[in-house]
Image: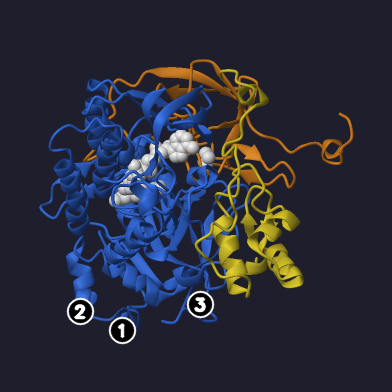
Chain colours: A orange, B blue, C yellow
Amino acid sequence: MNSMRVEHHPVLGDLENQKEIKIYFDGQEYTAHEGDTIASALLASGIRTLRLHEDKATPRGIYCNIGHCFECRVRVNGKNTVRACLTPVENHMQIESGTPLSASFIKGGTL
Amino acid sequence: MIDLVVVGAGPAGLGAAIAAAEHGLQVCVVDEFVKPGGRLLGQLHEEPDGKWVNGIEEAQKLYSRAIELGVNILCGVSVYDLQKVDHGWCVYTTDEMIESKCLLLATGASETPIPIPGWTLPGVMSIGAAQVMGNVHRVKPGEKAIIIGVNVLSVAIARELQLCGVHVESILLPQPGILAGDAAQPEKMMESLLRLSHLAPSPLIRMGGKWVSPKLGARLFPKNGFKMWGIPIQLRKTALEIYGENQVEGVRIAEVSASGDVLPGTEKTVSADFVCIAGGLTPMSELASVAGCSFCYVPELGGHVPLHNEFMQTNLAGLYVAGNITGVESAKVARAQGKVAGLSVARVLKALTYGGNEKLHSAVEEVKETRKNALIQFQPGIEEARRELYGKFDETHKKTLISI
Amino acid sequence: MNEESTVVCRCEEITLKEIQGTIEKFNCSSREVKLRTRAGMGSCGGRTCRSTIDRLVEQMGGPVISNEVPLSYRPPVRPVSFGILGGAKE
Ligand SMILES: Cc1cc2nc3c(=O)[nH]c(=O)nc-3n(C[C@H](O)[C@H](O)[C@H](O)COP(=O)(O)OP(=O)(O)OC[C@H]3O[C@@H](n4cnc5c(N)ncnc54)[C@H](O)[C@@H]3O)c2cc1C
Ligand code: FES
């Protein structure tokens, strides 16, 4: 689905020679453009929710898009707290959304 | 130990790197964004003669020049700590630790949020986020936007979103109350918009332009707003709540009086698939604070700024600032300030050969000239506020610094 | 939804009501609000909500905004892994 891409722009010109790659978000495959950030690639596929709040489980997506707010944090290839808005996609990248901490973890119990 | 580390590859940081490298200094620029250019990347401005200035092209020019001069530019790398060491600074990054004789902080500004009920829903973003998504990443943040917060930046970016093919339903005010403060006052916002009148002469001049007081302007303001580029700007409507189940579905709005009170019985809902919040900009001072700089609170410059002088020196030896960290202004001013900072560093490191003083002083004049001609004035009274700030610096710190 | 239940600190989901309540009860500074409510202590280091908290404290009769940065920043200003803090490359 590429309808969210700004293919033509009266001042910035047309998007040309976009190389497509595959990324995975929570196990599902999506097409991204080389040069995308994780956030822009997922948004282009219509995905806005990047995580659920650790405590309250409310859905969250990008807020500032330039690295200031940390709202877009996801897990990438096993690494935590990666800002989706600042991280370029790579072919076969594995991205996982943030999920609420389990109740026992919050209370300090063992998992 | 290299000569200069610059944090931030925006117009200020790149401008400084170029000026310093032109005088033979060894420079490294660090930026956490994916591409060099800072916030210049998202900008599109129509000059009074109708020509567009494309921020991506401008950034590319600065980048190419810096690379040509041998500047080392690291993107995707964050600076998380700084330390003063003997004869210089130590910069801790997510890539490596770098030591330099001088350090320039050119970290720009961040957006001031306005908390609004429902603003944590996916699909709500800052106005700058939408600008970057559309103009830099070339992805539409959605099909139909509502923008909350009326100011120079939100109006300019609304137009840019329109060029990306987004339908901007309306630009309106946040809900009056303790959280929004002035941003919910039609009169105050009218004042801010009037600073844009040269950009969009016809509707605003019809509304009163430069010669009508904001107070009168807000009262005369038509209840249904007026349009700029076909986008309704509604100083008499307010956003009460952003609603949606799992993401934005729309905004509940109401009418307000000229003094900003909600008129009962005027509530309704307007659908949208994304909402932008525009609360203005504030200098991003975190690294200067960690370094231990003295600060000044200057509302005209957008908030707390590191105390500095005309030559971009802070009160700490070897530490410089340039661009929006010193006060919110347009990209051209930031770039001109960067040049001053670069020359200032070259001067202190004895790399400015003959004619150096004149170069530095004419760069300082260039900043003032650029400021005078800037298309966007984020706040009134910038020049006076700066004069006062520099005066304060000279009073307290002149003797302790290497003289210029 | 009313203004009181608006989330001010997005990271820790702290509402206006909690912050106002704390300022009223303890008549406190931004720093104390932060320590008592956790507002401004989340992943973003308070970058997003600090200006709102400063303004709330001022408007509710606390210290007026002065030249000093009310909530001082402490390193690391970006969350970094222990590996990086220990000197490893990312
Ligand atoms: C969202 C937004 C939109 C704007 N839109 C406009 C506009 O349309 N028109 C206009 O005239 N002005 C606009 N501005 C104002 C803008 O700040 C100036 O035009 C200009 O870009 C300032 O240049 P600068 O070099 O000072 O900072 P910037 O261009 O902001 O560059 C600062 C750079 O520093 C980097 N950085 C910050 N902290 C760190 C760190 N700890 N580690 C590593 N890197 C770091 C950032 O990634 C960024 O690239 C906007 C500002 C913002 C924040
Ligand atoms: S959206 Fe704010 S850090 Fe990524």
Q: Position of residue C74 (x, y in %)?
A: 61, 44
Q: Which type of secondary structure does the marked residue at label 1 adopt?
A: helix
Q: Which mark is residue B216?
A: 1
On the question of residue B73 being in view, the answer is yes
Share a chain, discs 3 and 2?
yes
Which of the pair A66/A15 is nearer the observer?
A66
- Pointer 3 residue: B266
Residue B104 occupies quadrant: top left
B142 to the left or right of A56: left
Q: Is mark 2 within 8 Å of ligand 1?
A: no
Frontmost residue, A47 versus B391? B391
Between disc 1 and disc 3, the foreground one is 1
* Residue type highlighted by circle 2: Trp
Q: Taking the image as drawn, is residue B143 in sight?
A: no
Pointer 2: residues within 10 angstroms few (<14), some, or many (20+)? Answer: few
Label 1, residues with CA under 10 Å away: few <14, some 14-19, many ≥20: some
Residue found 89% across the figure and 30% down from its top: A110
Q: Earlier in the sequence, mark 3 or mark 2?
A: 2
Residue B219 position within the rendered picture, expressed as x and y whole percent measured from the top left: 35, 83
> Which label is found at residue B211?
2
